[in-house]
Image: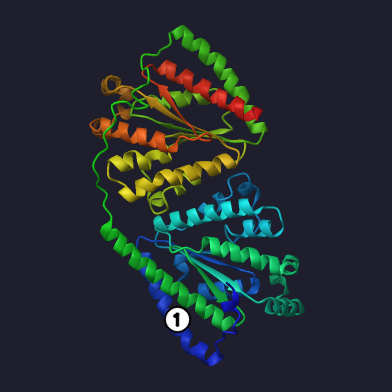
Amino acid sequence: MFEAAEVGSRIDKEAYKREVPKVREALLAAQRELAASGLAAAVHIGGGDELGKVSALNALLSWLDARGVESFALGPPTDEERARPRFWRYWRLLPPRGRMVILLGSWYTAPIVDRVYGRMDDVTFEREMRRIRDFERMLVQEHVPLVKFWLHLSKAKQKKRLAKVKRDPQSRWLIGDEAWTYFKKYDRFREVAESALRLTSTGVAPWHVVESTNDRYRNLTVATTLTRALRDALEVAKATAARSSRRAALPKPRKFNVIRQLDLSRNLSDDEYERALTRHGARLARLVRQLHEADRSLILAFEGPDAAGKGGTIRRLTQAMDARLYRVISVAAPTDEEAVHPYLWRFWRYVPAHGAVRIFDRSWYGRVLVERIEGLATREEWSRAYAEINEFEAQLAEAGAVLLKFWLAISAEEQLRRFTDRRTTPYKQYKLTEEDWRNRRKWDAYEAAACDMIERTSTDHAPWVLVEAEDKRWARVQTMKTVCKHLEKALSD
């Protein structure tokens, strides 16, 4: 794979001086088109040539409009990053639409280094590459085209460059001691890197291997390739937008489904409720403290029809918790900032550190519920969201989170009673909106979408728990008991 980048490609000084103005003009024009489009762009500069990567980055930053680009050199993860899933740090760096980010080092670095040093076996490495491939495909589908460069030096050229840098006090500081340590394993790094590139070079996110021996050739090649990739992405986006449709037939629920089989007559008396709430509240308080001490997080997501009692159930849970440990996230329509990032970005930013609790009053399932039914997402967007959500939740679980998702179920008749109560009770009127009435008119469609959601995203590590919520007391106690049961299981594993 790397032989084509060892042929001695170079550009002389005169040709370089002639080409730079044209290359810069074309690159700036592509950047302006990006800024005016609905796309962002992520550029990855990788490879074993550390000085070459810095030189290429400096060239791009000097030729691009600085107002539309950011760059990050990624080293070892910080304590804050280690306390969350591995991809959390990368999601935080994704640019909004119209802007570009350039990364030195990325999601490839850790698995390649770990495989070279034997800290990761082949099976795990290939699984990580599949995860990267899925992540990159999702980014492209979410309007963040990727341009990936691998700057290559032959073993002899690498050794010569390192020796030259070591003798030069002006540039010696750019290369750490690990550069020589890594060079001793050059052959193994090359083998693993070839495998990584082969497994992750796809039609939507191909690798561009660039010979890095000659600075002028490398920097011009990176710039011209980036320009071409941006223009190609813009053309694809235009063609895709012309074909996209946000309107689809509303789904209809099956006569027999997981929601309709619930026994909504279940209830508790006031005395039963108070006793159960006291007993299980103390139990929950103890378990949340133990989870915190075990450095594991708890994530709870609540969905259900309007007026199903999500807020009241959440309040009963948090009353049993240390306020320093939990945070409740109320999810509404995306803000302007959230709307210009990939869909899951707004939820990744709230992923808790080890030992903390996050409770979502509505959640990332909005894409397959309200956005699907109201035509706010295209068929392609909400259809692929199931797999994207499953992957998101798998990463949360792998990082040690206890993840539970609750669907609070009520009947249409009970919802109408609660709506009427809100409308006629002054201090409850703020809870009722025209949107609630509009959603009610599509009750069957929302039920069908919820059944699809439960069927396609309930897993062992992130199960859906369906709670009969016609009686609020029953729903609150059942939810608390379920959280306690899963925490006890997690702490005993």
Amino acid type assigned to the residue bearing label 1 in the image:
Val
Q: How many marks?
A: 1
Structure colour scheme: rainbow
The C terminus - image quarter: top right
Image coordinates for residue 383, horizontal then vertical, percent: 36, 46
Image coordinates for residue 107, horizontal then vertical, percent: 57, 57
Establish if 173 lies above or below 456.
below
Establish if 367 lies above or below 228.
above
Could you tell me if residue 183 is visible in this image? yes
Identify the image quadrant of residue 248: top left
**Nearest the eye: 394 or 295:** 394
Q: Residue visible at 52% across and 26% down?
A: 318
Could you tell me if residue 72 is visible in this image? no
**Nearest the eye: 493 or 97:** 493
Identify the image quadrant of residue 177: bottom right
Image coordinates for residue 305, horizontal then vertical, percent: 34, 29
Pointer 1: what residue?
Answer: 23
The N terminus - image quarter: bottom right
| Tag 1 secondary structure | helix
Residue located farthest toward the bottom when viewing the structure as drawn: 14
- Tell me the crowding category of disc 1: few under 14, some 14 to 19, or many 20 or more residues within 10 angstroms, Cα based: some
Q: Residue visible at 53% across and 92% down?
A: 14
Q: Residue visible at 51% across and 74% down?
A: 60
Image coordinates for residue 315, horizontal then vertical, percent: 47, 25
Establish if 201 lies above or below 474.
below
**Nearest the eye: 260 or 31:** 260
Image check: 147 left or right of 211? left
Image check: 279 left or right of 413? right
